[in-house]
Image (cartoon, grey):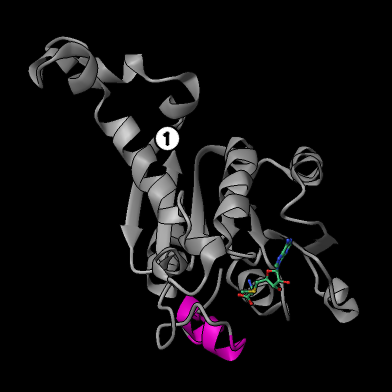
Amino acid sequence: METNEDFKTLDILARENSADKKFHLHDYTTTYDRVLTPLRYKEIKLFELGIARGRSHKMWAEYFPKGEIYGIDLFVRKHLHEIPRVHLEVCDQTDREQLENYGKKNGPFDVVIDDGCHHSEWTIQSFEVFWPTVKPGGVYFVEDTFFSYHKDLPECYTPPTVMGYFLDLANRICKPGLEQKGSYYAGYDRRSGPKSIEVLSEWHKTVESISFQMGLIMLTKRGV
Ligand SMILES: C[S@@+](CC[C@H](N)C(=O)[O-])C[C@H]1O[C@@H](n2cnc3c(N)ncnc32)[C@H](O)[C@@H]1O
C-alpha cells in the first residue's frame, strides 16, 4: 500500500509522463481517476489501443502497481519493451482478424481504452471486436470523440460517426420497453423489476451504461 508521501493521482502521473489525458489538455484523468480508483491496487489487465511514445502506457503502469498493461500500434519503439508489466505489440487496428487474434490471446481485460487512429470505421470495428473481451463489471472508453464533429476529417465526420454509432447504441438499449410494449409502465413488472431488457439482443444486454462527456465515451459492462 502506498503512503501519503508517494501517493500520486492519475493527473500527476499524466503530467509527469507528458500524457495528453491530463487535466490541462483533454482532462480525461478526472474521469479515469474517479472510475478506476477502486481497481488501483488490484491485479487488473488494462488494454489501450494506440501507443505512440508510450506515455500513457507508462502512466498506467505507475497508476496500477499490480496491473498488467497491454497496447497495440502500427509501430512499437524498441525501448518501450523494457517497461515492467507493459506488453506492447504491433497490430493493425484496421485488420479485424489481427484484432480478434490479439483479443483471444491477451484478453479478457478489466479496462479497454481506444486511443488509436480515431477513424469512425476502425473505432467502431475495434469496439465490436474488443467489447466481448471486457470482463463482466469492466469498462470500455473511446477517446477523442470530438473528431466526429470535425468537417475537415471525412474519415471521422462521414456517417456513421463514432458519436452517431454510440448515440444510436444508447437509444437501442434505452428505448425497447417503450417501442415494443407501447407504454412506459408496460416495460416494468412490479414484482420482478424492469422487463424491457428482455427484448434486447444478448449482445445489447451486456451494456449496462453508456456515458458521454467532452471527447470521451464510457461504457460499463453488466456484472454477472
Ligand atoms: C493519439 S496516439 C496514441 C497516444 C497514446 N495512447 C498516449 O496517450 O500517449 C494514436 C496512435 O494510434 C496509432 N495508429 C494509427 N492508425 C493505427 C492503426 N491502423 N492500427 C494501430 N494503431 C494505429 C498511431 O500510430 C498513434 O501512435
Picture coordinates of residue 165, whole percent (x, y):
43, 46
Q: Which of 44 and 31 is in front in this view?
A: 31
Residue 120 visible in this rendered orientation of the protein = yes
In the picture, the quarter occupied by the N terminus is: bottom right
Q: Give the range drawn in magenta.
A: 5-18
Q: Is residue 92 left or right of residue 128?
A: right
Describe the element under mark 1 as helix, strand or loop.
strand
Residue 188 visible in this rendered orientation of the protein = no
Q: Report the residue at 45% width, 51% height from top.
A: 159
Q: Which of 147 and 73 is in front in this view?
A: 147
Q: Which of 103 and 46 is in front in this view?
A: 103
Total numbered labels placed on residues in the image = 1
Picture coordinates of residue 204, whole percent (x, y):
44, 28
Write down the residue under mark 1: 207
Picture coordinates of residue 154, whole percent (x, y):
53, 65
Magenta span contains residue 12:
yes
Please determine whether, in this image, residue 108 is positioned above or below residue 68. Answer: above
Label 1: how many Cα within 10 Å (few below 14, some 14–19, many 20+): many
Q: Which of 179 and 112 is in front in this view?
A: 179
Q: Which amino acid, by three-letter code, is at mark 1?
A: Val
**Quarter of the view holding residue 91:** bottom right
Q: Is residue 206 left or right of residue 114?
A: left
**Quarter of the view holding residue 208:** top left
Q: In which quarter of the image is ligand 1?
A: bottom right
Q: Report the residue at 43% width, 68% height from top.
A: 33
Q: Report the residue at 50% width, 80% height from top.
A: 7
> Does the numbered disc 1 mark a residue whose Cβ is under 8 Å from ligand 1?
no
Q: Report the residue at 63% width, 52% height from top.
A: 122
Magenta span contains residue 169:
no
Q: In this view, does 147 lie to the left or right of 70?
A: left
